[in-house]
Image (cartoon, coloured by chain):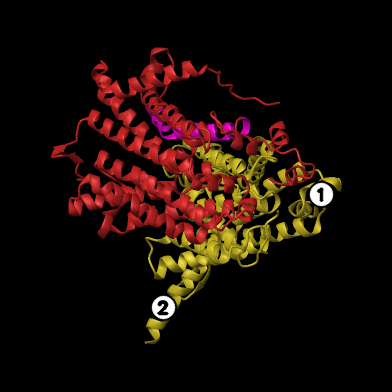
Chain colours: A red, B yellow
């Protein structure tokens, strides 16, 4: 029995209209009459877009090439600290720092990816995890460079033609610009030879190798591009938040981004963006709700102590654990699946039989064994 | 001259004792990873959380319910086994036929879930076993050689670890269920054709691994005098590093890896840099995975086409 959330099907016109309306709301958000909540909502929107960038970046590795990357936040941290340190010490412009941070991310992606990408999936996942933990340790301990646990304050805001960006709406448009750039790059790659090579690797590594795809090279490229997008996101974060701290780049941040893409649909650009658009505001709403839980519950006659409230705020990531488990159980391909990923995730379903009806298909023979 | 030598020696000796203690705990946790991986090729990320839960279960029993430590100890083992079985039945069993990526993500989800559940139940503050709840003998010196002190707690840890390892060896090699475990590790389909109840044996594997993880949790909770909800995450990954170092899937490998890693960590912290104490485990793990992915005692596996 397959239990799943069935997305209603809309006609093409309805979709087009919906997209246009959505785009209009997004672009005009700063001028909407939101009252006092306006700046806060814009911050949440900026955060959401930042996570969309991160989700697009991470998506390349598990979504496009089928490898689990648990160390994405390492590159995010590298980008943030690259940007932060270059700003604090050399006062380099935001517009130079973004490519520099992305390059640094790519460099580390290659350094880590080249020796480790020949490993099988779960070993690779563990290595990336270890890497991101090492990044945090280095940031924390090399105090001469990063100020360690004191964090790095005093990062200057970016400026454009001498105008310093400081209002929430300015950052909002800045992040939209970055997001569109990343989206453009990822879309172009998806449709290119590179993208097709990645999909071939995702579906069957050995078959891809047999038809002449140099899998190591293509995996390293995927990893480097993913890392550079992560670093780009980190650089924006540093110049937006203006303070960075090693604790901001802990392992669970990687899992959060992973959760976004799993929720939306690994491998689907639109899906992972929707994943971020749904889950990030939801996290913020949840935090707001839980922070105000004791007074709200008191109104309906339930006593919740402030201690319990703060515990619940800290533990709100529990929800992400539940989402990951439930998604994998009931809809592993995400809410907006790519047909191929869907077929991979349901190896015993009719989809697969329709996909290749050959008599001797190893996937059928070793159906049970291949886990 | 001779005195400096003695000082150096006693520092080294104390480090050696500490390293062996830590190593045997890592080995206990690592066995849980390696057994599950050997049988169903899954990195059970939630194993570190079982270890953490073990510490909290016994802590709650001795503090909130005033249970004697020697009663709490076996009860914790049982509770952790049940937790392990629940993990398997609720989270992993439905995904037996799913791709590995799905199971791996589920494991991470369960880890996140359990960790935050512990945060809700017990709060984020570091807890410690109150001294009076523990046998006083733990903190007395069992052996004193010059400046080197071995406490009864360290002896107890080593003893428990050794006994459990020996028990595990017996189970794996001299019982029916152990034979079934090895059969499933080799070929699940054929094993099921031979009349082995695959799911039951896998659950049993989880139970054993979790029991050992839970014991490790209690021991570490007492040894470092600290229990907190995220303790499982670092210990889990270090134990995983130990399992990888020894060769994942190999139980003797996990013991050896645990010992080597515990020693490397204590020595590294003592002689190289204490700030990078945790980094040593990660670095060892990454290097082993890159240069010798089959580990010290593991067999290299061929890719199945």
Query: Is residue A316 located in the magenta-colored stretch of the structure?
Result: yes
Looking at the rendered image, the quarter that the N terminus of chain B falls into is: bottom left
- Is A36 placed above or below A231 here? above
The residue nearer to you, when weighing B178 against A76, is A76
Secondary structure type for disc 2: helix
Residue B195 x, y percent position in the rendering: 86, 45
Q: Nearer the viewer, mark 1 or mark 2?
A: 1
Q: Does the rendering let one see residue B159?
A: no
The extreme top residue here reads: A300
Q: How far apart are the alpha carbons under marks 1 and 2?
A: 55 Å
Residue A45 x, y percent position in the rendering: 33, 28
Q: Does the rendering let one see residue A174?
A: yes
- Is A122 placed above or below B11 here? above
* Chain of the residue that carries numbered disc 1 in the rendered image: B
Report which quarter residue A187 is drawn in.
Answer: top left
Residues packed near mark 2 inside 10 Å, few (<14), some (14 to 19) or many (20 plus): few
Instruction: Say left or right for A267 vs B170.
Output: left
- Is A232 placed above or below A281 here? below
The residue nearer to you, when weighing A66 against A48, is A66
Read off the residue under disc 2. B8
Choose the circle earlier in sequence order: 1 or 2.
2
Secondary structure type for disc 1: helix
The residue nearer to you, when weighing B14 against B279, is B279
Residue A12 x, y percent position in the rendering: 50, 19
* Chain of the residue that carries numbered disc 2 in the rendered image: B
Read off the residue under disc 1. B191
Residue B256 x, y percent position in the rendering: 61, 66
Query: Which stretch appears magenta?
Result: A306-330
Q: Are marks 1 and 2 on the same chain?
A: yes
């Amino acid at each position: 029995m397959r239990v799943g959330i069935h997305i209603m099907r809309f006609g093409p016109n309805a979709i087009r209209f919906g997209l246009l309306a959505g785009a209009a709301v997004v672009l005009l958000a700063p001028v909407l009459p939101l009252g006092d909540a306006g700046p806060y909502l814009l911050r949440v929107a900026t955060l959401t877009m930042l996570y969309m960038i991160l989700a697009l970046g991470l998506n390349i590795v598990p979504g496009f090439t089928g490898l689990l990357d648990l160390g994405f936040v390492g590159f995010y941290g590298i980008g943030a600290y690259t940007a932060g340190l270059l700003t604090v010490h050399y006062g380099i412009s935001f517009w130079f720092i973004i490519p520099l941070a992305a390059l640094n991310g790519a460099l580390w992606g290659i350094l880590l990816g080249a020796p480790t990408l020949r490993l099988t999936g779960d070993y690779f996942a563990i290595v990336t995890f270890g890497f991101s933990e090492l990044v945090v340790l280095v940031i924390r301990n090399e105090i001469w460079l990063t100020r360690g646990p004191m964090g790095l304050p005093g990062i200057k805001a970016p400026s454009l033609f001498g105008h310093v960006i400081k209002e929430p709406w300015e950052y909002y448009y800045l992040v939209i610009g970055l997001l569109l750039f990343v989206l453009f790059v990822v879309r172009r790659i998806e449709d290119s030879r590179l993208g097709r090579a990645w999909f071939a690797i995702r579906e069957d590594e050995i078959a891809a190798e047999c038809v002449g795809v140099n899998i190591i090279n293509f995996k390293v490229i995927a990893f480097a591009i993913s890392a550079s997008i992560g670093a780009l996101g980190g650089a924006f974060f540093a110049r937006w938040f203006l303070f960075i701290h090693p604790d901001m780049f802990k392992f669970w941040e990687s899992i959060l981004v992973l959760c976004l893409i799993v929720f939306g649909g690994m491998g689907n650009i639109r899906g992972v963006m929707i994943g971020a658009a749904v889950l990030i505001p939801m996290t913020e709403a949840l935090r707001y709700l839980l922070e105000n839980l004791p007074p709200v519950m008191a109104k309906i006659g339930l006593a919740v102590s402030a201690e319990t409230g703060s515990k619940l705020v800290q533990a709100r990531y529990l929800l992400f654990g539940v989402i990951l488990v439930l998604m994998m159980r009931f809809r592993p391909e995400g809410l907006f699946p790519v047909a191929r990923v869907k077929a991979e995730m349901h190896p015993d379903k009719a989809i697969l039989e329709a996909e290749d009806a050959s008599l001797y298909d190893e996937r059928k023979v070793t159906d049970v064994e291949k886990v | 001259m001779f005195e400096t030598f003695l000082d150096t020696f006693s520092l080294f000796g104390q480090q050696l004792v500490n390293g062996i203690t830590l190593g045997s705990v890592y080995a206990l946790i690592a066995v849980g990873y390696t057994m599950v991986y050997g049988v169903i090729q899954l990195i059970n990320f939630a194993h570190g959380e079982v270890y953490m839960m073990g510490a909290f279960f016994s802590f709650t029993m001795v503090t909130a319910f005033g249970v004697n430590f020697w009663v709490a100890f076996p009860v914790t083992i049982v509770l952790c086994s049940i937790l392990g079985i629940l993990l398997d039945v609720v989270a992993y069993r439905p995904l037996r036929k799913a791709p590995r990526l799905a199971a791996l993500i589920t494991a991470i989800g369960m880890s996140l879930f359990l960790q935050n559940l512990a945060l809700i139940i017990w709060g984020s503050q570091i807890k410690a076993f109150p001294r009076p709840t523990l046998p006083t003998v733990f903190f007395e010196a069992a052996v004193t050689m010059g400046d080197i002190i071995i406490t009864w707690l360290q002896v107890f840890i080593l003893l428990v670890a050794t006994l459990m390892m020996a028990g595990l060896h017996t189970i794996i090699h001299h019982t029916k269920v152990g034979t079934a475990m090895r059969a499933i590790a080799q070929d699940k389909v054929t094993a099921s054709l031979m009349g082995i109840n695959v799911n039951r044996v896998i659950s049993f594997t989880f139970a054993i691994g979790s029991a050992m993880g839970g014991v490790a949790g209690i021991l570490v909770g007492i040894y470092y005098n600290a229990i907190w909800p995220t303790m499982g995450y670092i210990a889990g990954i270090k134990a995983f590093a130990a399992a990888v170092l020894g060769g994942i899937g190999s139980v003797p490998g996990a013991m050896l890896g645990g010992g080597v890693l515990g020693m490397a960590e204590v020595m590294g912290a003592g002689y190289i840099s204490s700030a990078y104490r945790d980094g040593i485990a990660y670095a060892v793990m990454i290097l082993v995975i890159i240069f010798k992915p089959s580990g010290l005692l593991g067999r290299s596996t061929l890719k199945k086409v």
